Amino acid sequence: MTPEQNAAKIIEVAVPLPLDATFHYSVPDTLAHRASIGVRVLIPFGRRKITGYVVGTPAASAEEVREIVDVFDEEPLFTEKELAFFRWSAAYYFHPLGEVIKAALPAGINLTSRKRNVVAADGTLVQEEVLTGGRPVKRETFYRAVAAAGPPPKLRGTMLRLHEYLCRVEEAPATQLRREFAATAVHFRRLLDLGLVAAAEREVYRDPFREEVFVHDLPLALNVHQAAALEHLSAAVARGAFAPFLLHGVTGSGKTEVYLQAIARVLEKGGTALVLVPEIALTPQLVKRFKSRFTSGIAVLHSGLSDGERYDEWRRIRRREVTIVIGARSALFAPLTNLGIIVVDEEHESSYKQSEGFRYNARDLALVRGKMEGAVVVLGSATPLVTTYHAVQQGKIGYLQLPERVRSLPMPTTELLDSRGRKSATFLPELVAAMGDNLANGGQTLLFLNRRGFATYLVCEECGTVLSCPNCSVTLTYHRRRERHFCHYCDYSIPAPSVCPKCDSPSIALLGRGTERVEEEVRELYPDAGIGRMDRDTTSGRGGHSRVLKGLENGTVDILVGTQMIAKGHDFPGVTLVGVISADATLNIPDFRSSERTFQLISQVIGRAGRGDMPGRVLIQTLNPGHYAITRAVAHDFTGFYQDETAFRAEAGYPPFAYLAALIFSGNSAQEVDKGATAAAGLLQRLKGEARSRVEILGPVSSPLAMIRGRYRRQILLKSGQRPELHRLVARFRKQLKLPAVVRMAIDIDPLDML
């Protein structure tokens, strides 16, 4: 280092790139007072300039360092306490710190430099460096009426209505006045020239719920079980220390009311609350409950918002204008201060796990953040994870039980319909009759099938060719309304063929059923009924989930066909019948959790029936009526399922009796991927021998989905009875592994999806 650099301030910077290291930079004196932990800096990186995050201020650097270009922020974007959480997450999931920070911050705020050609004053072509990216602040013009110096001039039409309205209200934004009065710039300019109004421009937040009206409500009376659960949570809140609980309540038992009243206790103490939900489909319903109950600031964070809305919600939280945050998994990183309680609703849902990039599990990290913040953590579910219930049995998590529905409502009556040896119709006669009776009695029906599309695959009856995706190891799904076959992994699609693409035979058949086909068959059965469908195809776009769900709420939908979206936490008092089209579909997935997921899905969809004043009924069609996941779900017997499932997992050595890590190798060349995975397995075996480790190494083997988006995939599974032993092996392996440039490796700690 030069003497000048030695005297300069040195900072440690993390970059949002797939690089494990952090980097040291010097800070010029003019920027030294602003370059604190948590701010973004513009740094030279290779031949370009990128955004970095200041994560430390070491006294000196042993290497020769470059100088930062600029500091972007007047205030830190994250605190040292939040940085400690980011560092823990990065270390546990073996992911670069810079990318973890990027995932925690709102999208679009990072800037990068690029060069563009411009014509100089002398006519020569020169390169100019420009910054791209960043999230602009939204500004709005507000108008208010002012007293005129002399007698007011005569106004008419739009200007008269505008002025009268502004005289009645304190002020109004220009967008509202344009919308309600069809006002234009000419109207505003004329009123300004006459001295009748004043204008001021200021920053405004983009509010995702600006169109909604919320009616205030009061806390509900609790039954004895809810009151006992609230008492335990309130005592934990009063202690002000980390306290994890499983709130295990049957569907319709009033878990949300317990959340609301526990959060009220936290707010009374001056704390804040974080509420995580597994799907954005659940967010509008939950936000309505919370905004009706609390007058304090509530922010919402999920992928359904625009980047601008998410940025504004994040700024409200950072500025401490918010006491409650509700959102999907990324809301875990919301910059709340004085966090008193974290609620993870439907804690069993796999959507809490990020499946690409930074592969974190928000449910697990909620416990880590709760411990770091000294907060109460509530994991709520009617069908908790086997691992969570095992932790309860081990005394690691407190147990709160809600064994009955609110208002003493009965659980729905449930019947198994054995589909074996019967015609391959979508609906068995018993289900058709039940739907007709329910429709005649004014009840609403949910039909659950966990496959979207019209037909799950197309096959030639002459040569046996199945239409498959050229980029992924899956068959194409036919979507009738769009008359195309789609891959649900890479969105590849082709027009529906009239002849076999291999032998030109016209004898091609559509096999399997998806939600689109079920919807069509229901329309044929009941042409006068209101039919709706809820899957990824019908809920895409802004407000898609709300549009579908409002049909059930206002009664215009009599029968709703849907995938697992309809099984997750929704409360529809009018639903009195639930039909499960194929209960055993998820049992055939090559994953050790397939039984658990089947039990959870069936139990959750059963729970949608009979939540109002009318009793509920559930009919379940299955080809495997004897499987314990199905029989236990029908009997509402979680304890029995837990005993059956843990007996299998203990024998096979799966969680909660072991810890897992999956190493996924991918590339465009099958040969290179195979070579890289084989070399990685050899390195693992060598490191295991050197450390005398007991970690079990399985593979490499071809992934169940051997190709996705044109990339071949192989995987290695690591199993260990001790978490530290597993992490030590992965850490040593990661440092020493050298893969071909064309092969990528992803590390998935505590994997949920083995496909």
Image (cartoon, grey):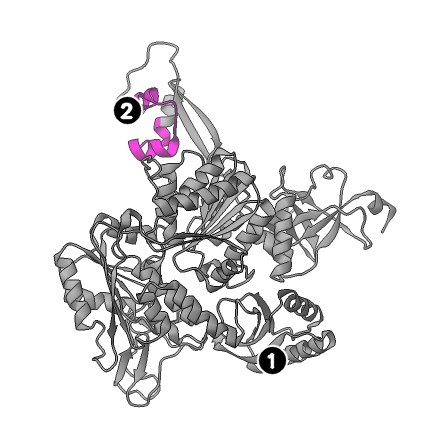
Q: Which mark is residue 161?
A: 2
Query: Few, some or many C-alpha atoms within 10 Å of disc 2 (few <14, some 14-19, many ≥20)?
Result: some
383 in relation to 109, above or below = below
- Highlighted range, magenta: 163-187
- Horizontally, residue 423 falls left or right of residue 177, namely left
Mark whose residue sits in front, 2 or 1? 1
Q: Earlier in the sequence, mark 2 or mark 1?
A: 2
> How far from the left and from the top, in percent, is residue 219?
35, 37
Instruction: Residue 748: give x, y in percent of width and height.
Output: 56, 66
- Label 2 secondary element: helix
Residue placed farthest to the top in the image? 150
Q: Position of residue 337 (x, y in %)?
A: 56, 40
Which image quarter: residue 292? top left
**Residue 652 within the magenta-colored segment of the rendering:** no
340 relative to 200, above or below? below
Residue nearest the observer in this picture, 680 or 166: 680
Q: At label 1, which amino acid type do we have?
A: Glu
Q: Is residue 350 above or below residue 544?
A: below
At horizontal 55% and vertical 62% (from top left) the residue drawn is: 357
- The mark found on residue 155 in the picture is none
Query: Can residue 567 be seen from the camera position used here?
Result: yes
Q: Amino acid at mark 2?
A: Arg
Taking the spot 38% from the left edge, 14% from the top edge, the residue there is: 147
From mark 2 to mark 1, how far is it between C-alphas? 73 Å
Counting the numbered discs, the total is: 2
Q: Secondary structure at mark 1?
A: helix
Q: For mark 1, does the 10 Å Cα neighbourhood hold few (<14), some (14 to 19), or many (20 or more) residues? A: some
Name the one closer to the observer, 49 or 362: 362
Circle 1 is placed at which residue position?
A: 672
User: What x and y, as percent, mark residue 476?
Assistant: 36, 75
Q: Can the viewer see residue 17 in this picture?
A: no
Q: Main secondary structure of the magenta part?
A: helix
